[in-house]
Amino acid sequence: MWATPETLKKRMQVQTMREVFTRMALAAGFRPRPEFADDEVEAVWDAVGKRWVAMCECGGAEVVDPNEPVFFCCSCGNAKVGGLWRPVNFPQER
Ligand SMILES: [Zn+2]
């Protein structure tokens, strides 16, 4: 089964995607800073996994949640924006 925002939160026993990303980031050796960058990432629908994903410029990809549009790349630690959170842009048509 593919990971979705719901399965990730349930597995980690947390309520928010920020907590999910924070746990994954810490496990990967990154510590998210509290603020948001202006620089958005684009969400794309993964029809196979039936979930939204967003890709980082580094090639990393993460599951994202339209109900809580936050992104933290656990491959590079959002290096492009100095470790800040990034907002996620979802297409209008969905
Ligand atoms: Zn990245």
Image (spheres, helix red, strand yellow):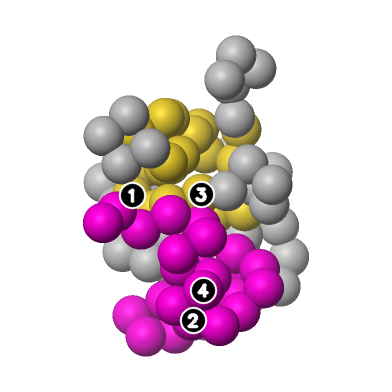
How packed is label 4: few (under 14 Cα within 10 Å), some, or many (20 or more)? few
Report, in whole angstroms, how far the alpha carbon at label 1 lies from the one at label 3: 9 Å
Residue at image location 31% in from the left, 41% down from the top:
49
- Viewer-nearest of discs 4 and 3: 4
Name the secondary structure under disc 2. helix
Q: Find residue 61 and name its label.
A: 1
Q: What residue type is labelled 4?
A: Lys
Residue nearest the observer in this picture, 69 or 72: 69
Which residues are drawn in magenta? 1-30
Q: Sequence order check: which comes first, mark 1 or mark 2?
A: 2
- Magenta: main secondary structure equals helix
Q: What residue type is labelled 1?
A: Ala
Would you name the residue on which mark 3 appears? 64
Q: Is residue 3 visible?
A: yes
- Determine whether label 3 and label 2 are within 8 Å by CB: no
Residue at image location 49% in from the left, 34% down from the top:
43
Would you name the residue on which mark 2 appears? 12
